[in-house]
Amino acid sequence: METYVKTRRHPALPAPSRQTGLIGWMRRNLFSSAGNTITTLVCAAIIALTVPPFFNWAVLDAVWYASDGSLCRAEGAGACWAFVEAKFGQFIYGRYPAEEIWRPNLILLLFFLNLAAVLTPRMPYKGWLAATLLFIFPMFAWGVLHGGKFGLSVVETSDWGGLLLTLVIALSGILASLPLGILLALGRRSKLPVIRTLSVLFIEFWRGVPLVTVLFMASVMLPLFLPEGVTFDLLLRAIIGVALFASAYMAEVVRGGLQAVPSGQYEAAKALGLSYWQMMGLIVLPQALRVVIPGIVNTFIGLFKDTTLVLIIGLFDFLGIIRANFTDANWASPNTAATGYVFAAFVFWMFCFAMSRYSLYMEKQLSQGERR
Amino acid sequence: MRNQAPALIFGIVFGALLVYLFLPGAPSGPARDAQELSKAEQENLAPEAARGGTLRVVRERGELLCGVSQGLPGFSNPDDEGDWRGIDVDVCRAMAAAIFGDASKVRYRALSAKERFTALQAGEIDVLSRNTTWTLTRDTVLGLDFAGVTYYDGQSFMVRRDLKVSSVLELDQATICANTGTTTELNAADYFRTHGLEFEMVVFEKTDEVIAAYDAGRCEAYTTDASGLYAERLKLKNPDEHIILPEVISKEPLGPAVRQGDDRWADIVRWTLYAMIEAEELGVNSANAEQMKKSDNPSIRRLLGVENSYGQNLGLRGDWAFQIITQVGNYGEIFERNVGKNTPLGIPRGLNALWTNGGLMYAMPVR
């Protein structure tokens, strides 16, 4: 009787071709069941119906260079990128004088340097850098952007516009709303009745009125209450309105975080003999804020997009100035408005996406301790 | 003690900035301009300024605050450089030319339709030049004072050229697109009913929807104010295939307004307007104004301030009209530059022609 004993391992055969490579991947992920197959086909049909026409419009048929809108008006013309090109400076800086453009550029550069320094984990003197960003930087930025002293010519805020204005309003709102929101959240959970009542009133009032109303009140009603001839800066009014509005939302986000910190943490802090501010600053807030990073960034992104509402009080933010330029008869065409909106959407998306990625990064950094 | 260095730096910078921001600034442009007025001019002005409050405020500020729209093609819209252009804008530039001798001394405030009247009442602007229709209600209870008409607008109809229609009266059984809830809807319905025509109304909330529906052929005619029709026509796929019918079925006289109660200021706006119309009538334009100073025609000599300085009666400089015409132009130039035949809008003069050409533009004599 002969036995067959295999002396060598059989070499591993490649997996059946239907289960590897592109086909295998598609079988596993796109056509694994009847339901999935239908979904895949429907989605493919939607993509095939929408993407090629959009690509044709945005790239192939687009008008890239033109000195006025006549080419964009021609039959079969696609996106009118020449419009964005001709107005680009205006979209970014509004009517800020061309020879003074270095001022907003400098401020933006310094802002992002300062911000990067604050956002970098384990930066030396981080607290002082944050304080600089919160207190020194806004004053410095105002001094440089508005000018009027030390040889800088005055640039009235009514000449600020475009992306510059959007960033000024959104960043002022963001910078002001986080500390204000934290204070309000602490106030709302305070045991002191007066502080608690005031915080609750403030939060509920500002959360209860629409931002449009706030801006409209600031722009239309306020001047009627002030003595005649006394006006104060429209942009300042808008920034204050946006900041107060956002801080009410921020307060509720932060309060959610405070409630998530177990009471044992408070008790332990007290048992160590920490004062109220030490307890909050060293034990409670670092844990509370970490929990609500998604909520905070969510509020920031909402605030950033809400700045477009300032158009109703006659400030031309990024979207506002794009829309105002739709009325330039030289560029009027069936494609001008669509092109402008696509451009605006893309720029807004870039900023919001950057914020959201940073928040994901921070969440991962800060939750190291919990992932073991 | 190494931790005190950043605190010290922070404190010093913070303090320095506080001082910097609250330090009184150097005198800015406007104040200096007031000082630069010649002594003779100032003496001449003194009694006028005392009576005309707004003029004095404007002179001291050194610039005119002008309320315009947030964008209306041909009336006030930003150009490629971001400067405001349009008929309404040119009215303000003409006023600045008359007051300061410099048409660029205007600061524009873009106003929505809702806030325009409050902004004027609250003194945030000196003049409202924002395609505003002159009506009795606005002239009385809203506390405005209209200074004249810069553009006679009115509701009209746009149809496809291949419909071969030349009058609204031929639009029997037509479907008409309009904005919902506006007077245009009512006006059109009234007009069709009084002329015994059958019609069907298709209304939309937003102008973009109306124009899209019209372009897609859902209706035969689109109705709104004529200036709007010319602007919206540019957004159609083939603008040349559409015509605007000659009938104007409503009255929308657009003009600049000021606060009630400052008659001298209203006079300045009114006569700025008249000076531009009068100049067109007399054949004076921005190119030939300098030569026209030598003209024998007494009307031209009076207008340009060669004989009798009528500007001073207004509290302005003697060459006020000359400055308006050389820096901004006469009414015809302004019309043609902003909305006329050679612009994309291509609006014919129509009612806005001079009275001598069958229009309504008629200036009171400067004398």
Image (cartoon, coloured by chain):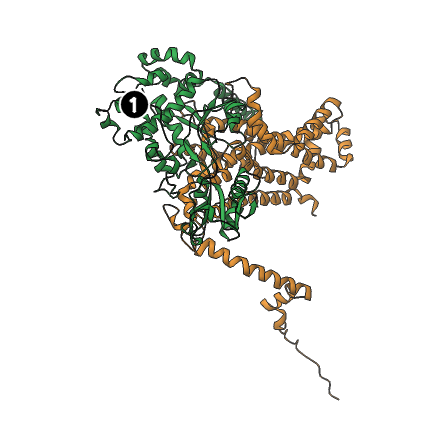
Chain colours: A orange, B green
Give the position of the N terminus of chain B as an image quadrant.
Answer: top right
Give the position of the C terminus of chain B as an image quadrant.
Answer: top left
Q: Percent position (x, y) of residue B257?
A: 46, 26
Residue type marked 1:
Leu
Q: Is residue B332 above or below residue A62?
A: above
Local packing at callout 1 (Cα closer than 10 Å; few below 14, some 14-19, many 20+) is many
- Residue B302: tell me if it is visible: yes
Task: Give whichever of B142, A338 is nearer the camera.
Answer: B142
- Which secondary structure lies at badge 1? helix
Where on the picture, by quarter, is residue B349? top left
Where on the picture, by quarter, is residue A263? top right
- Residue B83: tell me if it is visible: no
Q: In this view, does A45 lie above or below B260?
A: below
Where on the picture, by quarter, is residue A13? bottom right
The chain carrying label 1 is B
Q: Is A184 placed left or right of A216 in the picture?
A: right
Q: Percent position (x, y) of residue B73?
A: 43, 39
Q: Which residue in the protein does label 1 denote?
A: B303
Which residue lies at the image location 47% right of the left edge and 44% below the top edge? Answer: B157
Q: Is B151 placed left or right of A255 in the picture?
A: left
Q: Percent position (x, y) of residue A45?
A: 58, 62
Task: Give whichever of A151, A263 is nearer the camera.
Answer: A151
